Image: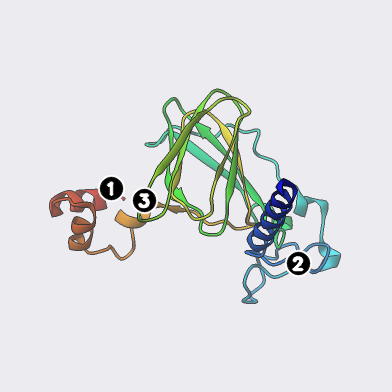
Amino acid sequence: MAKNVVIFSEILVLACYHIAFELEPKPLQDFCVADPTSSQQINGLACKNYALVQASDFSFSGLHIPGNTSNQVGSRVTPVSVAQLPGLNTLGISMVLIDFAPWGINLPHTHPRATEILTVLEGSLEVGFVTSNPKNRLITKVLKKRDVFVFPIGLVHFQRNVGAIAGLRSQNPGVITIANAVFGSNPAIAGEVLSKAFQLIKNIVDQLQTKF
């Protein structure tokens, strides 16, 4: 009986993995290096001429350069997505390096197209994500050097203090910084809407909108 349970569990895991993988289609050729000069409109980026592909299309240098964290939030994200590394096109992965000043924060945000897996390179890092409605449960942990943490696709998450590198299961994961999107939309969301949503008096909402 126990053996049957194990087999069922393995099948369930494989089925879930298959569904998750299909969020981005499988490549139908060796590679499809992105051609940002193409005007072709497709779900992704058009392929560069096969004969013009170079090793540089699959290489990125820059993660050795410390990010400038002298900003209001005390962090700097260096992305390596299809925009920086054209060879990632259709491969369904990307990564970022996050540098933090002391007590620096990577602001609450979401990735609409990617699950994220993070590894701490040095020091310690507080991480967390919030589950969906109606529970909105905060799941948080302090990670040490070489610890790993996963942020499920689409959920609001954050990190605070000392360097980390993260991989994302999308060539173009997207990022929605919650405060910027809510208080800095263009055109602005009506103050009355935000006042009711955040239970704030309208002049406070007006002040927040001017900051973004």
Q: Is residue 40 above or below residue 177?
A: below
> Dot 2: what SS?
loop
How far across and down, in percent of the image, does residue 5 sit? 69, 50
Q: Report the label total.
A: 3
How far across and down, in percent of the image, does residue 31 sit? 79, 62
Q: Is residue 158 above or below residue 81?
A: above
Q: Is residue 187 above or below residue 142?
A: below
The residue identified by callout 1 is 211
The residue identified by callout 2 is 48
How far across and down, in percent of the image, does residue 39 sit? 63, 75
Taking the image as shown, residue 211 lies to the left or right of residue 52, namely: left
The image quadrant of residue 45 is bottom right
The amino acid pointed to by label 3 is Lys
> Dot 3: what SS?
loop
User: Residue at 54% across / 37% down in the picture?
Assistant: 98
The coloring applied to the image is: rainbow
Label for residue 154? Answer: none
The amino acid pointed to by label 2 is Lys
Dot 1 surroundings within 10 Å: few (below 14), some, or many (20 or more)?
few
**Precedes in sequence: disc 2 or disc 3:** 2
Farthest residue in the right direction?
51
Q: CA distance from mark 1 to mark 3?
A: 30 Å
The image quadrant of residue 66 is top right
Q: CA distance from mark 2 to mark 1?
A: 41 Å
The amino acid pointed to by label 1 is Lys
Taking the image as shown, residue 171 lies to the left or right of residue 205, namely: right
User: Residue at 43% across / 31% down in the picture?
Assistant: 104
Q: CA distance from mark 2 to mark 3?
A: 46 Å
Taking the image as shown, residue 133 lies to the left or right of residue 44, namely: left
**Near-viewer residue (46 or 111):** 111
The residue identified by callout 3 is 135
